[in-house]
Amino acid sequence: MKFGEAFMEYLHGDQERLLDKCSHVEYKRLKKVLKSCRTCRALKDSKGEEDDESRTLAQFCQFESCPLCDQKFFSELVKEASDIAGCFHSRVRHLLHLHIATGAQRYLVRLRQCFMNDQLAMVQEGQMLIEYVTMNAIAMRKILKKYDKVHGSVNGRNFKYKMRAEHLEILQSPLLIELGAFYMNFFESNSGKSDGFSRPFSCDLSTTEPVVTFMLPDSVKLEYHLTCAVCLEIVFNPYALSCGHLFCKLCACSAASVMSFQGVKAASPESKCPVCREVGVYANAVHMIELNMLLKKRCKEYWRERQLADRAEMVKQTKEFWDLQTKYMIGY
């Protein structure tokens, strides 16, 4: 089955309840735009007579950049990518918040599970979100590839780079890694039983380069590395900056010149990512709680050692901070 047919089947399939409130790539309509553009090129190359409209469109389409397509493609794709990312992030945050609820909210969640299988519902929601992000990411990749093929350009490829630079590339989202960690945590807590669900995520911490792997259709594989670029160890109590790079909390705080007990988000707006040097990436940092839980289960000894070391460093920093505050107050 061609992808266009598979995508339309997906949109009108079991996921329709989710899609009522979520945006998606207008794949079929954008393909029609490209078909029109290809027809214009054919008219230009033919020796037959053309009407004024066809001649105008043909003149547009003889260049690598087509104004007609650009207006409908790139402006709409930016909006669609932004809406898809917004929908995905809000739904994932809500799902993970329920899973890691604490205090009274945790008690209410557990109470509800006595009367209904909320845990199964959360996994079903996670499955739908994974399929949602996968299908839309593939649709966007294919339509941009087709754009370049029709126009003989690299504008579609450049647009993908632009989306990545503006953090609209959903497959690079740290919340996708969190969703994968949630998935793996669920299956491990249920003795590996999949209950009919596919398992697109896997985690390998035994190699020199620990990774989380996400398998897409057509055997396309994405790898998310779990090594902190500062301490060069597996990330501990990880945070993902808004640029997408992962760091240990202590390392991120150190790079931003803030105390560990103050937290990553206390960093100055001028603080830069240690890897890509992008400014202002600390304010919207994501605490990767599910990933930390997964690492705690998989690397118990390593996690315990890092916890002791981090606590000692936090106590040291706290003491130094209050010593400085005391000296400042008493003038000594």
Image (cartoon, rainbow, N blue to C red):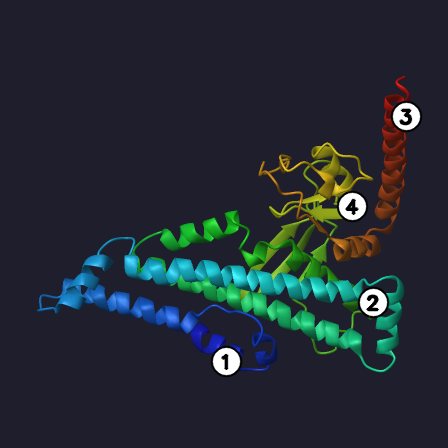
Location of residue 64 in the rendering, given as x and y in whole percent from the top left corner: 28, 53
- The residue lying toward the viewer, choosing from 219 and 18, is 18
First in sequence: mark 2 vs mark 3: 2
Residue placed at 50% from the left, 80% from the top? 9
Q: Are marks 2 and 3 in contact (CB under 8 Å)?
A: no
The CA span between labels 2 and 4 is 21 Å
| Amino acid at pointer 1 | Glu
The CA span between labels 1 and 2 is 33 Å
**Closer mark to the observer between disc 2 and disc 4:** 4
Is residue 66 shown above or below 270?
below
Q: Please give the residue where the numbered disc 3 appears in the rendered image.
A: 326
Residue 104: which quarter of the image? bottom right
Q: Are marks 2 and 4 in contact (CB under 8 Å)?
A: no
| Amino acid at pointer 2 | Ser
| Amino acid at pointer 3 | Thr
Location of residue 175 in the rendering, given as x and y in whole percent from the top left corner: 66, 57
Few, some or many C-alpha atoms within 10 Å of disc 1 (few <14, some 14-19, many ≥20)? few
Q: Is residue 16 left or right of residue 196?
A: left
The CA span between labels 1 and 4 is 42 Å
Q: Please give the residue where the numbered disc 1 appears in the rendered image.
A: 9
Few, some or many C-alpha atoms within 10 Å of disc 2 (few <14, some 14-19, many ≥20)? few
**Closer mark to the observer between disc 2 and disc 3:** 3
Is residue 145 shown above or below 115?
above
Few, some or many C-alpha atoms within 10 Å of disc 3 (few <14, some 14-19, many ≥20)? few
- Residue 122 appears in view: yes
Pick the quarter of the image with the N terminus: bottom left
Residue 236 is marked as 4
**Closer mark to the observer between disc 3 and disc 4:** 3
Q: Is residue 69 left or right of residue 195?
A: left
**Closer mark to the observer between disc 1 and disc 3:** 3
Q: Are marks 1 and 4 in contact (CB under 8 Å)?
A: no
First in sequence: mark 1 vs mark 4: 1
